[in-house]
Amino acid sequence: MNPRTAPARRRRFFLQTPAACIAVGALALALTGCSGTDSGATTSQASTAPSSPVASAVETPSAQASPSAGAADSSLAVPGYQVGEIPPIPLFALPDLGLLTASTGNLTPDLTGDIQSRPGITVSPARCDEAGVLNGGMTVVGGDGSVITSDGDSSLVNDGEGSAVYEDGSVSIVNNGDGSGTYTDDTTSIVVEADGTGTYTDETLSVVVGDDGAGTYDNSATGESIVIGGDGSGVYSTLTVSITNEGDGSGTYTDLASGLSIVNEGDGTALVSRGVQSIEVDAEPLVPVGSIGSFPSIDAAQPVESCGTVITLEDGVLFDFGSAEIRADADATLTELAELLNEADVPAANIYGHTDSISDEDFNQTLSEQRAQAVLDALEQDGVTAQLEAEGFGETRPVAPNENEDGSDNPAGRQLNRRVEIYVPAF
């Protein structure tokens, strides 16, 4: 049985770093039931893909696919997943509030404006530590109520009693001293209550977190909608893809564009169909969607300087399960990205490969290096003139927990950790 797809109690996890931070920033809010990333294996609703002559990593057939399904055509699989496997309801995050107001140069606003985020591709200002290492600049709120916040220097003025007020002419932050408070600027409004409930709204994004583990996420820019029921159920939808987790092990996946349909019965089997093709395969019951964690304390809203732009590509957009060879349908995305990098006259960029903690460390390290190199080769083949460097970090830089506090599997967190980042320093 492949350890990547074995039941949680039999999985081998190698979580070396207390989950770093997630995709977009100081008050980046990630709610559970999101995507996870395998050490070189999975992810689907995600984004961009490069291609390169790098050899694919070899992976053992998953327990989720029966012997006959193991050799099935990849057209019967969600990109980045195995036949019969349904992606988890994705995690979601709020933008880094501090980075909305401060940048070291023109690169960050230029690229974040020109390269649009979409399902599987996140474009955001980057924050770096003192050594210049990209740290993610995110706060992830897990379904178990856990909170992981990225490092950053505070710009709030404390009055000595725990409360504080920050004003800079365009941004206002009120910290009531008990974790509650408000953040407002020209486009964004955040209200955080002391019990962890709250709302976030900007020109394209709306997030509501309730006190019963339920919540909603709507992004008009990417077309994504997420509803978390708080009882293990959840629904994720885009213009073409719909994922439903009933919370009892059963669920469905539908892609109107490809015609792929997966019905997990929750009894160890799944029906996979596309056009005239239809097969039944072995499939683990779906892991319940975790309850939404609390909003981070308003303390997380700390204006910091951006060190550049980070473009995060979910592995499922770029690669098939366990492979380091770029998917054919990712070529157009990478070509578009190459053109934008050239138009922005980017002098240099770093390409980082990351995995989740399933499988052993050596496998994950090798796969992350191969995938980063594959993206670099693809961008160079598409004519990128910037000096590019590729580096793999394996499982050592998670942006979300690979497992929950009770030791159970967190597939949504793992999906976020399986990623390729293109970091463009500010210039």
Image: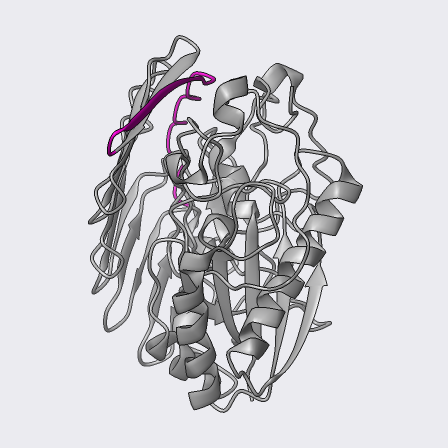
**Residue at the limit of the structure toward the right, as seen here:** 362
Of the 4 image quadrants, the one containing the N terminus is top right
Looking at the image, what colour scheme do you see? one colour
Counting from the top left corner in percent of width and height, residue 400 is at 55, 43
Q: Is residue 132 above or below residue 31?
A: below
Q: Quadrant of residue 30?
A: top left
Nearer the observer, 135 or 315: 315
Magenta-span inclusion, residue 292 = yes
User: Magenta region's main secondary structure?
Assistant: loop
Whether residue 227 is visible: no
Nearer the observer, 94 or 396: 396
Nearer the observer, 216 or 146: 216
Q: Quadrant of residue 184?
A: bottom left
Q: Residue at x 63, y 46 (%)?
A: 355
Q: Please state if 12 lies on the left or on the right of 4 as rendered.
A: right
Counting from the top left corner in percent of width and height, residue 27 is at 43, 56
Nearer the observer, 330 or 151: 330
Q: Report the number of numbered marks.
A: 0
Q: Residue at x 66, y 25 (%)?
A: 3
Residues shaded magenta: 275-295
Q: Is residue 254 above or below residue 50?
A: above
**Residue at the limit of the structure toward the front, as seen here:** 276
Counting from the top left corner in percent of width and height, residue 247 is at 33, 18
Counting from the top left corner in percent of width and height, residue 223 is at 22, 54
Of the 4 image quadrants, the one containing the C terminus is bottom right
Q: Residue at x 66, y 30 (%)?
A: 60
Q: Please state if 248 lies on the left or on the right of 189 as rendered.
A: right
Whether residue 123 is visible: yes
Magenta-span inclusion, residue 271 = no
